[in-house]
Image (cartoon, rainbow, N blue to C red):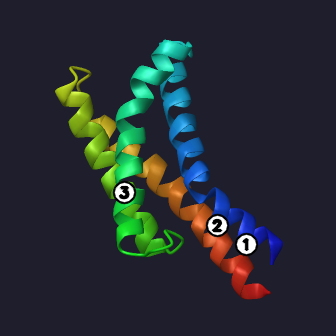
Amino acid sequence: MVAGRVVKELRIAIDLAFVVLFVALGRSAHRHGISFGGMASTTWPFAVGLGLAWILLALGQRTGLTLKEGSFIVAVTVGVGMVLRVVSGQGTAVAFVFVALAFLGLFFLVWRLAYRMLSHSR
């Protein structure tokens, strides 16, 4: 299955694309603009969290394609991202934590569910 191999090769990039989408929508909704510097400053804590999640999965020889592993990726991405935001002086609000969990949880898990459904139907 060619599509399945493509998804496996791009799985980290897919997650990163959703992190960037989350940041862009958030910056736009709060009228912060979508400049390169602004996007980079808001994205990096979550990108570091995402990278750590994928490193931990790789160390455990996991694919990151199951819903359970997707949930782990969401938790690490948001948890580390929020800690890094606080440490770097960007701050967080409780509502922001829930929005990040909801958005990234939805998008990280929906593409994995779609992948699973498509790969099992063939």
**Would you identify the image quadrant in which residue 113 lies?**
bottom right
Across and down, in percent, residue 16 comes to: 54, 45
Residue at coordinates 58% horizontally, 67% vertically from top-left? Answer: 112
**Would you identify the image quadrant in which residue 5 lies?**
bottom right
* Vertical side of 7 occupied by 117: above or below: below
- Is residue 93 something one can see in this rendering? no
Disc 2 designates what residue? 8
Disc 3 designates what residue? 53
Direction from residue 23 to residue 110 in the image, left or right: right
Q: Name which residue type carries label 2.
A: Lys
Is mark 1 in CB contact (under 8 Å) with mark 2? Answer: yes
Where's the N terminus, which quadrant?
A: bottom right
* Mark 2 secondary-structure assignment: helix
Q: Earlier in the sequence, mark 2 or mark 3?
A: 2
Where's the C terminus, which quadrant?
A: bottom right
Across and down, in percent, residue 121 comes to: 76, 86
Q: CA distance from mark 1 to mark 2?
A: 6 Å
Q: CA distance from mark 3 to mark 1?
A: 21 Å
For residue 32, the mark is none
Q: Name which residue type carries label 3.
A: Ala
